[in-house]
Amino acid sequence: MQQQPPTSPDVSSAAKSPLFQSSTQYRNWRFSVEQLKATRAALNQASVAAIRNTFESDSPGSSSDVHFLDANEEHLLVKLYIIKISQLCGHFRFPEEVEATGITYLKRFYLKNTVMDWHPKNVMLTALYLATKTTNHPISLESYTANIPRTNASDVLDLEFLVAQSLAFEFAVWHAHRALWGIWLDIQDLPQAPPHEELQRIHDTAMQHIRTSRLTDVELIYPPSQIALACLSLAHPEIAAFWARSKNADTALEAIESIKRTITRDGDTPSVDVVREIDRHLKICKNPEKVVGSKAYLAKRAREEKEAELKRKKKAENVRKATEQGNPFGEVLVGQANLDDDD
Amino acid sequence: MDAVEKANAERQRRWVKDQKVGEGTYAVVYRGRELATGRKIAIKKIKVGQFKDGLDMSAVREVKYLRELQHPNIIELLDVFSSKTNLNLVLEFLDTDLEMIIKDRSLVFLPADIKSWMAMTFRGLEFCHRNFILHRDLKPNNLLIASDGQLKIADFGLARDAADPGYKMTCQVITRWYRPPELLFGCRYYSTAVDIWSVGCIFAELMLRIPYLPGESDMDQLKTIFRALGTPTDEEWPGHTKLPDYVSVGQFPRTPLRDLFTAASGDTLNLLSKCIIFEPRKRISARDALYHPYFFALPYPTHPSKLPKTAAQTAAASRPPDEVDGNVDPGGGAPAGVGKAAPPKKLKRKLSGHDLSRNIARKLDFTAS
Ligand SMILES: Nc1ncnc2c1ncn2[C@@H]1O[C@H](COP(=O)(O)OP(=O)(O)O)[C@@H](O)[C@H]1O
Ligand SMILES: [Mg+2]
């Protein structure tokens, strides 16, 4: 039996195949519009409550005048930093894959964390640096930070574990721009295909829509193949329809209408004034426990240090007991305990 | 604590680290178990602090691919958590690897056994390639064997996505003896065919019981290959003399595979020869290999559970599961305060993973029962 050899992947069908359906993206990073809203609201509420608590335990009554950010304001701020990632990628001439992945990481990070704990201006740098590695385009940290003003190595590395953890170490991302490429290859073989230059123009326009779509939530809601088709449809509805029909995927054409609406509605750049106002509030409402050197920060560190000390003592005690009980292999146990000591 | 850190700590508490069992190039591997079930697992601990560029590329690759790939012939990544400056990969525990089995002189391989290992290797590899993933370090040592005999492709530290045509990749991959000639000639645009060459070398090694093409240097590797298979002509492999690092290492005549693999069947040699074709585009794909007559001809592949086992595997299997996996004190590597047990039991656990101490531990087990 003759089948498609794995060396010449059919990207467009791959995007809908069971391969995508077994991916971590399909399983763990797709939400309904309502789920997204609820997740962000819950995260925001819990964060505000925790930070308010920290303020109050530091000095009672101090949180009453603070304007904490709401979920919407958080979201707008993150959106601004999505744009900054794109600018940075242009500066570094990073491939599309790196840019798209960095943006996805930033979005996923803020489904688990609040900007009041971790400012996106820092997280953005780490998310993008991690993306260079996970997409196999690594650059040295030195040349990365050398090209970004007022940034040193620890600004990037200190958050790397936190970002990786927030992503649940799920680094692989399926992107709409790859799916578009697959569709585009198909289109060239369609009898209705326009001449090459026009096809190229359509592709470039669709690609612009894909870049715009990165400012929106669509990648958290829809599979990449549908986003790609929606962007193609925004560029040239007839070609998109031809393709869908050639794949017997007419129903896809209805599904993409809401994607098109979302991209058109949410793909705008946030107003600088609005974001500046949010950032002004953030200076006051950010979590003092995360501000290195602050009173709350030091208190938290002291608490953690005490817990760790207790743990170490207990461990040492266990080893001592085992040795005292005349255990002939006490040496082994001691050696073993030392070996694991760095956890 | 933040929700993310809390989730990490919770994940960490599910697993107990017992005994060091191996050391890789960038990681230490421990035997351990799942706290709730006692299920045996391996923890691959990767030190991160030592890299100036943060998370190391091998770790990133391994985590990225194993998170996505779920297949009976690919090692299962059960969990990932971080502890201070370490990244910990929780993997299913595997008793041995194909290299140890090949080297165990007391074992006799039947043709059906080799067919079984090859089928499992191709199945795992076909799944990688279907997902557009190149492994780039296939060798017997990275094909691990589970207690039920299933072969699992492991060590994805060099893996990468199959690149778009025209995208350059590094040719410094794959352990030398298993490295295909196009990489030795410095080819930067390659495909899934590089893994197929490695599998061909492993196939031959299973029959010969020694490495098939053991070159002493990169240059000698080419000579070794051409001595075995003949120097390729431009017809056989068009354009190879134009590759970046092409050198002429001399003219060697082609000798039939039959001369070396005297006992092999025709189907066997046909599949082997298709794995080690010089021209990468003509090399068989993993998918097509699975449909090769070799796998449908008699003898049928041995059932994994009936495959030859090393002494260590047999010992591990014959011990009652309670003694190996039982409810013992987590001790040193575990979070403090997770249960307590009497020292003798603890001793037994600490020793059972050490090859040297295994006999002593077994003796103690007998006196205790
Ligand atoms: N899942 C596992 N079960 C049991 N032992 C393992 C497992 N994974 C690795 N090991 C042991 O640790 C060694 C190093 O692991 P490996 O993943 O090959 O690391 P590296 O990438 O550094 O080569 C292996 O050769 C093997 O002995
Ligand atoms: Mg290895």
Image (cartoon, coloured by chain):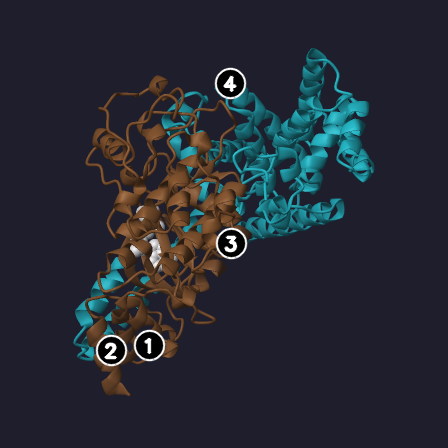
Q: Which chain is brown?
A: B
The numbered disc on residue A91 is: 4
> Taking A75 as reference, is B226 left or right?
left
Which chain identifier belongs to the cyan chain?
Answer: A
Residue at mark 2:
B362
Q: Nearer the viewer, mark 2 or mark 3?
A: 3
Looking at the image, can residue A296 be seen? no
Question: Within 8 Å: ligand 1 and the Cβ of disc 2?
Answer: no
User: Which amino acid type is marked by label 1?
Assistant: Arg
Q: Could you tell me the amino acid type at mark 2?
A: Arg
Q: Are marks 3 and 4 on the same chain?
A: no
Instruction: Tell me the CA gap for discs 1 and 4.
Output: 61 Å
- Of the residues under marks 2 and 1, which one precedes in the sequence? 1
Mark positioned earlier in the residue sequence (1 or 3) = 3
Q: Name the residue rendered at 19%, 75% in the picture.
A: B360
Q: Are marks 2 and 1 on the same chain?
A: yes
Q: Amino acid at mark 4?
A: His
Marks 2/1 in contact by CB < 8 Å: the verdict is yes
Q: Residues within 10 Å of mark 4 (few under 14, many from 20)?
A: few
What residue is at 30 percent from the left and 81 percent from the top? Answer: B342
Q: Element under label 2? A: helix
Check contact, mark 2 vs mark 3: CB within 8 A.
Answer: no
* Residue that label 3 marks: B71
Disc 4: host chain: A
Whether B220 is drawn above or below A170: the answer is above
Percent x, y of residue B101: 29, 59
Q: Quadrant of residue A14?
A: top right
Q: For the residues tagged 4 and 2, is the chain the same?
A: no
Q: Which mark is residue B319?
A: 1
